[in-house]
Image (tube, rainbow, N blue to C red):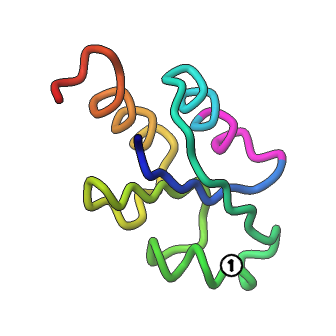
């Protein structure tokens, strides 16, 4: 089972895009809601080096803080879809 964590913000369309892909692939993940103020996003900055969301953490595969929704969706498709090589 995947050990995924997603840092997200309520109402964020980029976060929703990633969550949709996680749901499509039937992946369980731990959600971390971040504050709306960038200056208060210490936790997400620690894992990714920046304060934007979404950020994906996949410790099982050495991903410590991947930003950018398009990159995350592509990563999930390549690593967790039925066509992914195991």
Relative to 43, residue 16 above or below: above
Q: Secondary structure at mark 1?
A: loop
Q: Is residue 12 magenta?
A: yes
Left or right of 8, for residue 58:
left
Q: Which residue does the image show at 53% across and 56% down from the upper left?
A: 5
Q: Is residue 69 magenta?
A: no
Q: Quadrant of residue 18?
A: top right
Residue extending furthest toward the top: 83
Residue 17 in percent (x, y) is at 62, 33
- The residue range painted magenta reads 11-17
Q: Which residue does the image show at 60% across and 64% down from the upper left?
A: 52
Residue 47 in percent (x, y) is at 46, 75
Q: Toward the viewer: 7 or 11?
A: 7
Question: Which quarter of the image is occupied by the N terminus?
Answer: top left
Left or right of 23, for residue 64:
left
Relative to 75, residue 50 above or below: below
Q: What residue does disc 1 label?
A: 41
Q: Which residue does the image show at 39% across and 35% down from the upper left?
A: 76
Left or right of 70, for residue 84:
left
Label 1 environment density (alpha carbons within 10 Å; few <14, some 14–19, many ≥20): some
Residue extending furthest toward the left: 85
Q: Main secondary structure of the magenta part?
A: helix
Q: Which residue does the image show at 75% across and 56% down from the upper left?
A: 9
Relative to 12, residue 86 above or below: above
Residue 37 in percent (x, y) is at 80, 75
Q: Toward the viewer: 58 or 37?
A: 58
Residue 59 in percent (x, y) is at 35, 61
Q: Toward the viewer: 4 or 51?
A: 4
Question: Which quarter of the image is occupied by the C terminus?
Answer: top left
């Amino acid at each position: 089972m995947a050990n995924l964590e997603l840092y997200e913000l309520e109402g964020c369309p980029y976060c929703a895009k990633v969550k949709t892909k996680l749901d499509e692939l039937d992946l369980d993940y731990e959600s971390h809601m971040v504050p709306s103020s960038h200056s208060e996003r210490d936790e997400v900055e620690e894992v990714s080096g920046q304060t934007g969301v979404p950020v994906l953490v996949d410790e099982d595969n050495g991903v410590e803080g991947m930003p950018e929704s398009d990159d995350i969706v592509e990563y999930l498709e390549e690593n967790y879809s039925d066509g992914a090589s195991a």
